[in-house]
């Protein structure tokens, strides 16, 4: 059983979404999560069905549009304005009940894997495969990807306790956990005294009617959104009505010194996540094809997967590990401080989050969603016509953008500039308690500015989308 | 045991339903005309230079067809990209030319459907890589 430590959670909520009329009631309702999950399950099944049986051209297929335009775009908006709503409504965890029936005597997830190294590896492999197989261009592979999520979640849930799929494996979960560290909602408690005197600790242990936290977070000690799937089981289980879904300053988590543990795995995950943001966008501009050709010629490699592996090993692993480690070493030296390198790294890693989120937001929401959200209309019309349903008329293929194209560049530039400005502000805030001077902050500032510059250059390059079918 | 049997039946029912609904799809529907639609230009399109597209339509006997309506649609490989649409009428020697402006470099799938005055149609697909 968990116990309450001396340091309890912050912030004490001033604004609790669970206390908002209707919304709060729906969220706290025993089947509230199920409503969202069933909705997304229907969407997932639709994508799987069209992915396997529909036109194998992503812009004409629901698997292509729903997954690579709407899912990614809407997740970014949800994370920006609310929080980790996708994990809250995740359909992949729905077969959990079924899995629990199959699972006999659940084992604990191996101790050696109870960290973020698996998440780092899965994230890296996922984005490598994404580029190699052009997942975005193949409705068939997209459908298999969705099926894969269901199977993986089911198997891991059947074998292990502690929701290891969500916490340690799922790349979507990893993406959402890291991004939600700059989201405005967080699980918190109204009164820390209530938690101190609580006997049952139902928020984590569960009650007769409701299970406790699936990822085994203890609410009064939650300082970060990482690993929180927003399932709200804690709020439903708490017999004292003490759990809150609180509004917070989105920068509070990344500016607080003790919000994250000073672990290599977690901090490197955040750094790798930031660099993958740039690498993922780089995968859709002409220089990557020139680089691929040059590398293939220089190293005499014919296998595209191997060439991409080399490129992404540098962009997604070597740079996000090497540059921050060098910055940490230099920063520690300039601050004339005697401390483990890991501590210096962990002090400044959270400063990458505002910029990192801005880069992902500009790519997925700012570009793909805002330029293509309305394509769902003709694609759905076409899908229904295929099934012999003509109620909604002939597809209007001219539908696409939500905003005029001329607005996008200034909007995206503004978001990136805001992101880098907030990141530089966070560097200053994190330096303040230990009185790190400007020289000690400078290496971090330089990396952030370089990352932002790379993102801006990619944004202004002409896009070039190639698909797997052309070899 | 009862629950296991129930779940198995549920999965089987789901798979059956999927099969039935999949059988209803009409996307593989074929036109009733037998036409040959060839892309004449551009074969190696350039974003900067190519602003027209020319196609030739011939019938089963290889004779040029001049009275078809050509509906042309250019799709990129990424979802969410708005397609380029064009149409052409009044072929000359079976050749139809229409303005067609590529919006981005990369891989494109051009679908051209030729519809005859009696409503019969045929279509062809061309895969092109648009360069700078």
Image (cartoon, grey):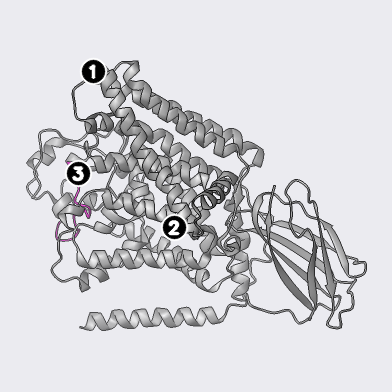
- CA distance for labels 2 and 3: 36 Å
Q: Which residue is mark 2?
A: A129
Residue drawn at (47%, 29%), measured in percent from left and top? A418
Between tags 1 and 3, which lies in front?
1
Q: Which residue is mark 3?
A: A219
Position of the N terminus of chain B, as image quadrant, is: bottom left
* Left or right of residue A376: residue A211: left
Total number of numbered labels? 3
Q: For this rendering, which residue is in front, A210 or B37?
A: B37
Q: Main secondary structure of the magenta part?
A: loop
Label 3, secondary structure: give it.
Answer: helix
Q: For this rendering, which residue is in front, A319 or A294?
A: A294
Chain letter of the residue carrying label 1:
A
Residue drawn at (84%, 79%), measured in percent from left and top? B59
Among the two numbered marks 2 and 3 on one chain, the one whose residue lies closer to the N terminus: 2
Q: Which residue is mark 1?
A: A336
Crowdedness of circle 2 by 10 Å Cα count: few (<14), some, many (20+)? some
Chain letter of the residue carrying label 3:
A
Say whether marks 2 and 1 touch (CB < 8 Å): no
Is residue A231 something that shows in the picture?
Answer: no
Among the two numbered marks 2 and 1 on one chain, the one whose residue lies closer to the N terminus: 2
Chain letter of the residue carrying label 2:
A
- CA distance for labels 2 and 1: 43 Å
Label 2, secondary structure: give it.
Answer: helix
* Left or right of residue A453: residue B117: right
x, y percentage for residue B49? 78, 48
């Amino acid at each position: 059983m968990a116990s309450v430590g001396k340091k309890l959670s912050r912030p004490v909520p001033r604004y609790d979404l669970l206390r908002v009329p209707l919304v709060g009631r729906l969220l706290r309702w025993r089947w509230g999560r199920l409503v969202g999950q069933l909705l997304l399950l229907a969407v997932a099944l639709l994508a799987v069905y069209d992915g396997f049986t529909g036109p194998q051209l992503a812009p004409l297929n629901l698997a292509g549009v729903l997954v690579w335009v709407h899912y990614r775009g809407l997740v970014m908006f949800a994370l920006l304005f609310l929080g980790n709503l996708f994990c809250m409504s995740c359909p992949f965890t729905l077969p959990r009940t079924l899995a629990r029936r199959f699972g006999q005597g659940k084992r604990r997830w191996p101790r050696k894997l109870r960290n973020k190294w698996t998440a780092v590896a899965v994230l890296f492999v996922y984005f490598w495969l994404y580029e190699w197989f052009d997942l975005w261009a193949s409705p068939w592979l997209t459908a298999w990807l969705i099926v894969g999520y269901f199977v993986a979640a089911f198997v891991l849930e059947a074998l292990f306790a502690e929701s290891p799929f969500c916490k340690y494996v799922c790349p979507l979960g990893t993406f959402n956990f890291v991004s939600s560290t700059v989201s405005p909602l967080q699980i918190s408690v109204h009164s820390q005294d209530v938690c101190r005197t609580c006997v049952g600790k139902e928020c984590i242990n569960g009650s007769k009617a409701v299970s406790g936290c699936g990822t085994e977070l203890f609410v009064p000690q939650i300082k970060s959104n990482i690993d929180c799937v927003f399932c709200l089981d804690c709020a439903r289980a708490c017999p004292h009505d003490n759990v809150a879904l609180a509004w917070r300053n989105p920068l509070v988590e990344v500016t607080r010194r003790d919000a994250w543990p000073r672990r290599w795995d977690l901090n490197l995950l955040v750094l790798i996540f930031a660099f993958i943001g740039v690498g993922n966008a780089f995968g859709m501009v002409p220089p990557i094809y020139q680089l691929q050709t040059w590398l293939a010629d220089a190293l005499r490699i014919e296998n595209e997967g191997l060439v991409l592996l080399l490129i992404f090993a540098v962009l997604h692993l070597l740079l996000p590990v090497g540059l921050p480690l060098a910055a940490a070493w230099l920063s520690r030296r300039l601050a004339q401080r005697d401390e483990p390198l890991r501590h210096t790294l962990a002090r400044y890693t959270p400063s990458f989050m505002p910029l990192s989120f801005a880069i992902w937001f500009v790519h997925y929401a700012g570009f793909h969603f805002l330029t293509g959200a309305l394509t769902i209309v003709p694609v759905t019309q076409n899908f229904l016509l295929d099934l012999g349903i003509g109620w909604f008329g002939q597809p209007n293929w001219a539908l696409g953008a939500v905003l005029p194209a001329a607005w996008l560049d200034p909007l995206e530039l503004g978001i990136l500039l805001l992101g880098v400005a907030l990141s530089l502000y966070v560097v200053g805030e994190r330096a303040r308690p230990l009185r790190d001077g400007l020289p000690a902050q400078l290496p971090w500032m330089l990396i952030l500015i370089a990352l932002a510059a790379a993102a801006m250059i990619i944004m202004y390059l002409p896009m070039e989308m190639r698909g797997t079918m052309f070899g | 045991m009862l629950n296991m049997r129930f779940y198995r039946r549920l999965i089987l029912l789901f798979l059956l339903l999927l099969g039935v609904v999949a059988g209803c799809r009409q996307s593989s529907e074929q036109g009733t005309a037998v036409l040959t639609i060839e892309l004449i230009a551009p074969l190696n399109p350039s974003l900067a230079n190519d602003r027209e597209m020319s196609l030739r339509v011939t019938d089963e006997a290889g004779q040029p067809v001049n009275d078809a309506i050509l509906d042309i649609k250019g799709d990129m490989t990424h979802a969410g990209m708005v397609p380029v649409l064009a149409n052409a009428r009044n072929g000359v020697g079976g050749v139809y030319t229409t303005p067609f402006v590529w919006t981005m470099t990369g891989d494109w799938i051009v679908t051209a459907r030729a519809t005859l005055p009696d409503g019969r149609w045929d279509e062809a697909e061309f895969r092109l890589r648009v360069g700078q």
